[in-house]
Each structure stands twice: as C-alpha cells, then as structure tokens.
Image (cartoon, helix red, strand yellow):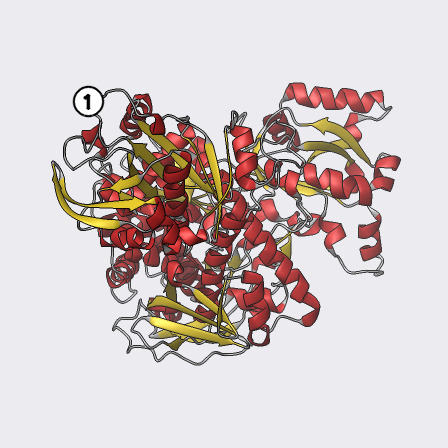
C-alpha cells in the first residue's frame, strides 16, 4: 500500500526552512491489534538498502515509481531525503520485524508546494507497507494508525495530507478507515492524485484510530536499544556478541506470519495427500475445511498433481463460529482424528511443529535477504538464506535437540562458521573405508594437512599413546558436548577415544545441519557427521556398519555414470563420498553384537564421511547452488527462480527446458537404462549455471545412503544392500514421486503463480524432455530403455506416494532404510501430466485415512 507523489521527482524540489513539527527524530511505540508498532529513524546500512530495494522493486510497490532503480540508486534517493530539512524517513516495525516505511514531509516546501490550498500545521505523509510472502490481516491498518498518530500527536500536525494515485483504490479504502476525507482530484506532474486530509478529531473517531494506543515516545540512541524496545526483549541471555538476545525472534508478529504460512502449507499438503478433502465454498475459488469445533476457509487453485496453491492472505480460522488467529499446533490437534498420529507420538509431532515455527520466525527476523541479491550470490550465501525446509513435509525444520544458542551457532541460517571437533579413535576399534585409488594416508593429508596431523600426533605422544594406533575422526561440536562427552565418557576415560581439540579450518553448516562445507579451503571435501538431533522423522545419526561399503557404492555409481554416453552428453556428474570412518568400540556396539539389544541410535553417534566438493568442478565463469534454492521464495514474496529466469534473457520454456535436460533427463536415463534410482530431492542436487543464469548441468550427492537398484542386474561384491527389486510401476515412482511430485509440482506452482509460465506449458516441456531423451516411444538408438518402466512412466495414472503420511505414522523413524519401498504410504492414484493424452479432469476424491 502506498501514498505517494513521484519520490524521484521530489528530489529536485526546492528546500527552505523546515517547520518545527518536522524536526523531531525519535522512536514512537504504540499498541495495535497487530502488535507493538514502532517508528524509528531510518539507518541506511547495507542490509537495509538491500531490503528497501527489494520492497520497491516488488510489483506491489509500483505506485512508488522506483521499480527500475538499482540498490545504489535507491540508497541515493533515501540519502537525499534524509539530507533534506523538510523530510523525515522512518522504518516501521511490528514486534521488532521490519514491515514498512513512513515518510513525513512539509507540503508547503516540497512535493505539494503551491499545488493545493495549504493550511498551517499541514504535514504530508507517504506510506509503504512492505510486500511479503505471508500477508497478515490487520498489518496495514496498524501501520497507518501509528503513522497518523505520530503525525498528529508526536509531530504536532493539525492535518495529515496524502495524495495517492487516483487509481490506487485499495489505499483509498484504507484512508477512509483511518478518518481521511477526500478533497478531490489533484493534477500533479506525474499522476492524477486523490488529495485527502485527516484531522486529529477525524482520526480518533475512525475505526483505525480507536484501535491505536500510544505506549511510549522516547529518543533511542543505539540500534540494540531500538531493537530491544521493539521486540519487548530488553533483558535476556545474549549471544555474547553484544547483539539482540538469542530469543529476540520469538515475538508476536513474526510468529503470526509463521503460523499463517505453516497452516496454509499444512492444509495444502494434507489436501494433496488426501488426508483432507476441502469443500467448495459459496464463492468460486473458495474452500472450507471443518475439524471439530474449528473451520478454516481460504481461496485456492488446484493445479496438476492435485497441487493446492492457497492464497495465504485469505486464510481464515473460526472456533465455535468466532474468528481466531491461525495456529499450527491447534490445527494439528483439531485434525488429529484424520491424521492418524499415534497418541504416544502426538507430543513429539507438536514439538516438531513448534520448532518449525521457531525456525521460520528466526529467518523472518534475521535472514530477509532478497531474491535479487541471492540471484548473484555464491553457493554458501544462498544456502544460508534458505528458509523453508522440505517443500512437501509440514514439520520440516525442527532439529529437536538444538537450543537457542545452537540456532545462532550451528544452523545454516545463522551464517556463522564452525570449527569441528577432532577425536582420535583406536584403530582396532574403528573402521575406515575409501574409494578405489585413495588410501588412508592420502585422505588424511588432503583433508587435514600435514601441520594439523603432526599436531594431533604430538598430542597423542604427550599422552603416552602411539599415533600409529589411532585415526582422526571429525565430530559435530554439538555432538561432542551433548552426546559423546556424556554417553561415551567411559571410552574417553579408557582413551579408546581421545579429544584432540578443534579443527584448524572453519566450516559452514548446510541445510542438512550435520553436513559442513570447508570455507577455509573450499576445494576440500564436505564433512558429513553424526548428529543425534531429530529432524523430519529421523534422528540424524550415521551407522559405522552401514557406511563400510559407502565408498564402494560410490565407486560403482561413478563408473556407471562415466561409461554411459547419454549421461556424458548431458554432462551429468556425481559428488562421490570418498571415505567413511566410524567408531565401534563402545558398550552400545558390544551389546548389539551380543544380542542384548538392537542396533539403535547409540550405535550411530560417532561416524563421519567425506564427500567431494563441487568447487573444483566449476569453471571460472560458473556458479552453483542447490536445486532446493529454486523453490525458495524470499520473505518479500519474490521467487528466486524467477530472478534467475528474468536475468537469463531467454523465454521461460527455454530456461525450464535447460533445467529439465540437466536434472530430469539424467534421473530418467539412470532408471530406464540401468534400473538405478537416486533420491534427487532439492538438497541432493547441485545446479551449475553460467553468467547467463541458464542451468548447464547438475551434480548429484548423498549417493551411499540413497541410491538403489530396482531391477535384477549384476552388482559388485559388497554392495548388495543397494539392491531393492520392485515392479516397473513402483520403479517409475523414482520419477513420479521423487522428481515430479517432490520437486517439479512445487516449481510449476511457483512459475504459474508468478505469471511466468503456465502449468500446462510446464508439463508439456517435461514430457518433451523425456521424449527427446529416449525417442517418442522409448525406442532410442541405444536400445537400453526398459520398456515396462517406460510405459509406466507415461501411464495415465500413477500411485500417489505420500511423504507426510510416513512422518505422521512414525515421527521418530518414518522409513526403514533397509526396505524403503516397503515403507511407502499410498493414497490412491494421481493423474499423470506426462501421459500421452491429457487425462480426464480428476474428480476430487474424499479424504482417505492413513494407509
């Protein structure tokens, strides 16, 4: 929402002495139904300039006339405004979260000077309520209420003057609710404005004025003081760095946004999985879900693959017929009878929901990097800016076990570097395996360096131990403090394990949290560690037994890929897990070996692997990011994929086809020609682009734990565990579920919602990609296409495999890794957008219980 003349034209207005009522520069706070609203003088630091640019470049801010400006030009405009004695620019927050701008100006001196009958005490105002992915009803009225109150009470104005564009009908309605009276059209150099005035009496009598209550108006000198007042967190445990308290993100407005977004996602994904069956509402495009005492209504579109796109701004909740705030935990509780969560696990799932909300609130407060910036950023900058977690899972970002301080230290969104902990493990009580051609000495020299290895050896010698009898093992710092130093205390006392201190190099945690990227030496490998933290249906341990053959699996997959001419032509590659190490000398392994217990979480607490870095694979003009980032929508509602597409200069179908050729085609080739399937979700795929922002190729990772062979074929000795024979229909789910339903339906929805590419064109391009790969009827030149799988791939319908049903059934371990196909949960079938003929419109089925 905006009230504005042309801000750019205003820069050239003459300046004279400012009246007294425009001079104060303090922070005002007021209670509103939306939360505690504060206005503070704008500070033009680099992060704020980036945010302002993102706000003003958004289509919703078109009336401000700055969409085409660069960040540098935006900074220049606001620097000029701040230097003008007739203007004040304020940043608006709700509960500490930045939500907009307020600009006050003297209409007798700038912008409206000589253009209307000025009265003493008139004060001009512009308002920008920031565009957001998740609009919260009441935000705009709260902001204009505090701005008007500031003008009329704190700044001493007799009338507030606004001149919004005559076509900006939404802001006209808002003005009326705040007590503005329309004077009439006013011709300005760049527009026809609707001149309007608001007096103190009119504001106090208005709907919005009655809801706005002043709390305080005081000068605040430091950013930390302003933030503490805005968030209501003036005291608390800090991070030790002098910044806001670690819990500063746990505030009302941020949590309201988080609840609304997660409720919309839950309703969409549970409807997609047919746990819910929304009923059409009275108006076209509206739907309703009833659950006990609660009812939820929303506007939505249903795209192919039953992908529900809910307009988050329209989401309404009622309890016993009365309006209520969206609440994700209450939604889960109300839906419990149809979700099928075991009673004994309901508390665990609600905790995952709460922690996911906390992660979202943290990102809203601290990680609002705009898509415009991320489109030019590197791999680690993009990784740290991600906010969503898995696109399909509702409870997707919990990390149960990590605390507040950990969130600021060891999560990707913290953008902090981490030093890993090094342990020495007795050689006869540990195991290390490497890929062919890489021996242990070479591995350690490459990943640790001679100086670090010598220092570790010196420490062992000082303890009277022989370095030749030990091998070094990297450990997650959280795991060391909370698990190993406690649950493995006897092993440390026996010196079967020896603490060697922290790594020389600094690392950045990835979205998986337990995997680290070496920022000191980016050419060195990723380090994946065991982490006894629960996230998305699993405790994230690593089994030393299971990982013994991980390098051998990677060798075999790498050789297969290298020998395939089609994959070579696609420039498809994998990032091998080149070595795995694990400690097995503890009581937990001994108990399992003696048959006294199963191999449980305690046997998966001390292990690690090294994975190749993508950095050495990049040409000088190339950049990389995860496929998951192409599903990222920044907090202002701007999709990152749209930024890349628009900067590429090519049409949307051409850009999409480049991505599909790089990503979808290799997955299908491996399935059809070799019976090899991956888990190619967004975090397991690295996309490589050139300076033109067009995808060139992809690199797959997480090979050892995720790949499977689904058809009978020879395998080398020692890797039989990856053989999981299934029928052709189930094999085709490697494309249908993992790629189409797990990634592409979300991407299609984003592109369609942004008006960039319609879903029908999207799926036509996907169909064309596969037909080009193997011929119109799957009879390509090499003759290696498996006909039953090809036919299943293009069947009119396919089994609807559901991810949330897995997690809801068992929130602690949703899949048996030794029988992943047997763990699948189905909910009927879905119309296949790849089918040769478009299927009939699907009749929306009734909700189906957990199978």
Residue 19 versus residue 833 in the image, above or below:
above
On screen, residue 451 versus residue 64, left or right, reads: right
840 or 344: nearer the viewer: 344
On screen, residue 610 versus residue 286, left or right, reads: right
Whether residue 643 appears in this view of the structure is: yes
Q: Quadrant of residue 339?
A: bottom right
Residue drawn where x is 31% and y is 22% of the image: 85
Residue 760 versus residue 519 in the image, above or below:
below
138 or 776: nearer the viewer: 138
Circle 1 residue: 14
Instruction: Return the x and y of residue 440 as percentages of the image width and height.
Output: 65, 33
Instruction: Return the x and y of residue 218 as percentages of the image width and height.
Output: 51, 31
Whether residue 666 appears in this view of the structure is: no
Instruction: Return the x and y of residue 622 as percentages of the image width and height.
Output: 35, 33
Residue 29 versus residue 265 in the image, above or below:
above
107 or 585: nearer the viewer: 107
On screen, residue 274 versus residue 225, left or right, reads: left
Residue drawn where x is 40% and y is 30% of the image: 42
Instruction: Return the x and y of residue 634 as percentages of the image width and height.
Output: 40, 45
Q: Quadrant of residue 191?
A: top left
Dot 1: element:
loop
Residue 851 versus residue 514 in the image, above or below:
below
394 or 137: nearer the viewer: 137
For the C terminus, give its image quadrant. Answer: bottom right
Q: Quadrant of residue 514?
A: top right
On screen, residue 823 versus residue 428, left or right, reads: left
- Exactly how many numbered labels are in the figure? 1
């Amino acid at each position: 929402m905006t009230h504005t003349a042309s801000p750019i034209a205003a820069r050239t207005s003459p300046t004279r002495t400012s009246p007294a009522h425009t001079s104060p520069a303090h922070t005002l706070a007021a209670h509103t139904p939306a939360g505690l609203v504060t206005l503070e003088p704008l500070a033009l630091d680099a992060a704020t300039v980036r945010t302002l640019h993102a706000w003003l470049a958004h289509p919703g801010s078109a009336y401000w006339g700055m969409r085409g400006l660069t960040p540098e030009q935006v900074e220049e405009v606001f620097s000029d405004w701040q230097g003008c004695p007739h203007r004040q620019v304020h940043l608006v927050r709700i509960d500490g979260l930045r939500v907009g701008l307020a600009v006050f100006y003297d209409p007798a001196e700038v912008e409206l000077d000589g253009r209307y009958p000025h009265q003493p005490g008139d004060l001009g105002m512009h308002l920008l309520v920031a565009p957001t992915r998740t609009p919260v009803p009441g935000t705009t009225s709260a902001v204009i209420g505090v701005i008007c109150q500031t003008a009329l009470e704190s700044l001493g104005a007799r009338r507030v003057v606004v001149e919004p564009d005559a076509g900006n009908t939404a802001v006209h309605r808002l003005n009326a609710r705040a007590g503005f009276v329309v004077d009439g059209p006013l011709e300005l150099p760049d527009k026809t404005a609707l001149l309007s005035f608001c007096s103190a009496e009119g504001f106090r009598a208005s709907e919005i004025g009655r809801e706005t209550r002043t709390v305080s108006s005081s000068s605040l000198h430091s950013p930390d003081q302003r933030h503490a007042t805005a968030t209501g967190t003036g005291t608390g445990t800090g991070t030790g760095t002098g910044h806001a308290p670690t819990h500063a993100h746990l505030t009302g407005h941020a949590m309201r946004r988080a609840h609304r977004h997660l409720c919309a996602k839950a309703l969409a994904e549970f409807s997609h999985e047919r746990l819910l069956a929304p009923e059409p509402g009275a108006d076209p495009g509206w739907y309703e879900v009833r659950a006990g005492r609660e009812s939820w209504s929303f506007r939505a579109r249903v795209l192919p693959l039953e992908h529900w796109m809910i307009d988050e701004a329209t989401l309404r909740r009622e309890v016993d017929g009365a309006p209520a705030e969206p609440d994700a935990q209450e939604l889960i509780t109300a839906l419990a009878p149809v979700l099928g969560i075991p009673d004994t696990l309901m508390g665990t799932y609600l905790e995952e929901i709460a922690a996911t909300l906390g992660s979202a609130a943290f990102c809203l407060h601290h990680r609002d990097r705009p898509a415009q910036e991320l489109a030019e950023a590197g791999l680690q900058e993009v990784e740290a800016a991600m906010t969503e977690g898995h696109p399909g899972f509702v409870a997707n970002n919990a990390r149960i076990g990590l605390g507040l301080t950990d969130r600021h230290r060891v999560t990707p969104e913290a953008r902090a570097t981490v030093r890993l902990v090094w342990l020495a493990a007795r050689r006869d009580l540990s195991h290390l395996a490497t890929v062919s051609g890489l021996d242990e000495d070479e591995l350690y020299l490459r990943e640790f360096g001679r100086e670090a290895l010598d220092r570790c050896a010196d420490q062992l010698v000082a303890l009277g131990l022989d370095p030749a009898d030990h091998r070094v093992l990297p450990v997650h710092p959280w795991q060391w403090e909370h698990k190993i130093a406690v649950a493995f205390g006897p092993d440390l006392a026996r010196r079967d394990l020896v603490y060697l201190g922290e790594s020389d190099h600094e690392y950045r945690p990835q979205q998986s949290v337990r995997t680290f990227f070496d920022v000191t030496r980016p050419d060195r490998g990723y380090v994946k560690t065991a982490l006894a933290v629960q996230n998305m249906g699993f405790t994230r341990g690593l089994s030393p037994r299971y990982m013994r053959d991980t390098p051998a699996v990677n060798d075999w997959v790498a050789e297969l890929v290298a020998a395939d001419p089609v994959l070579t032509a696609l420039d498809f590659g994998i990032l091998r897990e080149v070595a795995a190490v694990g400690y097995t000398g503890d009581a937990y392994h001994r108990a399992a070996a003696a048959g006294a217990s199963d191999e449980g979480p305690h046997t998966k607490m001390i292990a690690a692997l090294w994975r190749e870095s993508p950095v050495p694979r990049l040409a000088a003009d190339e950049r990389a990011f995860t496929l998951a980032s192409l599903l990222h929508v920044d907090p202002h509602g701007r999709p990152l994929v749209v930024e890349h597409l628009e900067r590429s200069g090519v049409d949307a179908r051409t850009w999409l086809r480049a991505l599909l050729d790089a990503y979808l085609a290799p997955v299908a080739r491996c399935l059809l020609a070799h019976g090899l399937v991956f888990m190619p979700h967004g975090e397991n795929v690295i996309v490589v682009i050139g300076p033109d922002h067009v995808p060139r190729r992809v690199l797959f990772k997480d090979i050892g734990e995720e790949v499977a062979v689904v058809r009978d074929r020879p395998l080398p000795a020692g890797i039989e565990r990856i053989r999981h024979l299934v029928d052709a229909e189930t094999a085709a789910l490697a494309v249908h579920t993992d790629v189409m339903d797990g990634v592409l339906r979300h991407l299609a929805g984003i592109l369609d919602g942004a008006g960039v590419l319609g879903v029908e064109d999207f799926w036509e391009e996907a169909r064309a990609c596969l037909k080009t790969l193997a011929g119109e009827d799957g009879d390509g030149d090499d003759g290696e296409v498996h006909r039953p799988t090809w036919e299943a791939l293009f069947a009119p319908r396919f089994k609807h495999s559901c991810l949330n049903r897995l997690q809801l059934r068992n929130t602690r371990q949703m899949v048996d890794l030794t029988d992943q196909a047997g763990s699948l949960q189905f909910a009927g079938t879905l119309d296949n957008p790849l089918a040769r003929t478009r299927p009939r419109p699907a009749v929306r089925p009734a909700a189906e219980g957990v199978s």
